[in-house]
Image (cartoon, rainbow, N blue to C red):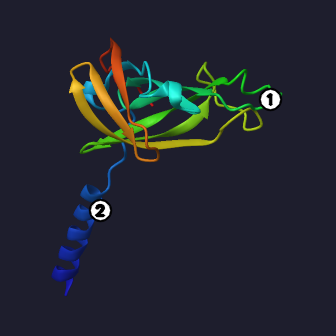
Amino acid sequence: MKKPFAFYLLVVTILLQTACKFNPDIQTPGENYLQGEWRQDSVTMQQQLVNYSLYNLKFNCDSFFVSIKTFSKADAGADSCTRNGQWTEYAKGVYEQRNDTLHVRGLFCNADYSYKDPTGCFRSGIYEERFKVSKVTDSVYQFNPTSGVIPFKAKLIKRNTCTPKPL
């Protein structure tokens, strides 16, 4: 009777010790091809659009920072937020890629990376987007947001290498 109990106790102990592990306390390296700063210069048929946005994306290891500059021809009246039909929103967070889909998730923030006050202009809180990514050239990729209909091409402006930092 003691032998089976001791055997089962040993098996359970080994399973518990090998089944769980803590997440590393250092950031992961992310995708090599994304490391650096990417800029969208224009939107297809932007002169005909009422609203459009231009993206500037920065990737460092598994982290991202995005600035989204929006242009609108719609009259917002005396709105102090839209500044004559132009405004910029910022977000930062982490990303992961599975197959051809890039998933970015973070929070809206200010230009200096500080978290945004939810009572200010425009969006605040969680920023989440999925992009289908395809290579055009080594320094140009097409990003097709799954929540929108207008894909955009971003050009590599500055390449960097990932040096993982402690969390």
Which residue is labeled 2 in the image? Answer: 16
Q: Is residue 22 visible?
A: yes
At horizontal 43% and vertical 24% (from top left) the residue drawn is 57
At horizontal 75% and vertical 27% (from top left) the residue drawn is 81
Residue 15, placed above or below residue 122: below
Front residue of 86 and 156: 86
Using the rendered view, name the quadrant where residue 162 is placed: top left
Front residue of 145 and 63: 145
Quick one: quadrant of the C terminus? top left
For label 1, the SS is loop
Residue type at mark 1 is: Asp
Using the rendered view, name the quadrant where residue 116 is placed: top right
Residue type at mark 2 is: Leu
Q: Pick out the residue farthest to the right.
A: 78
Q: Residue 105: image x %, image y %?
A: 47, 41
**Mark 2 or mark 1, which has the lower sequence index?**
2
Q: Residue 34: image x %, image y %?
A: 31, 26
Using the rendered view, name the quadrant where residue 151 is placed: top left
Q: In screen coordinates, is 106 left or right of 112? A: left
At horizontal 16% and vertical 80% (from top left) the residue drawn is 3
Q: Pick out the residue farthest to the front.
A: 48
At horizontal 22% and vertical 62% (from top left) the residue drawn is 14
Which residue is labeled 1 in the image? Answer: 79
- Dot 1 alpha-carbon crowd within 10 angstroms: few under 14, some 14 to 19, many 20 or more: few
Q: CA distance from mark 2 to mark 1?
A: 59 Å
Q: Are marks 2 and 1 in contact (CB under 8 Å)?
A: no
Q: Is residue 54 visible?
A: no
Q: Residue 32: image x %, image y %?
A: 25, 26
Residue 135's disc is: none
- Dot 2 alpha-carbon crowd within 10 angstroms: few under 14, some 14 to 19, many 20 or more: few
Q: Residue 65: image x %, image y %?
A: 48, 26
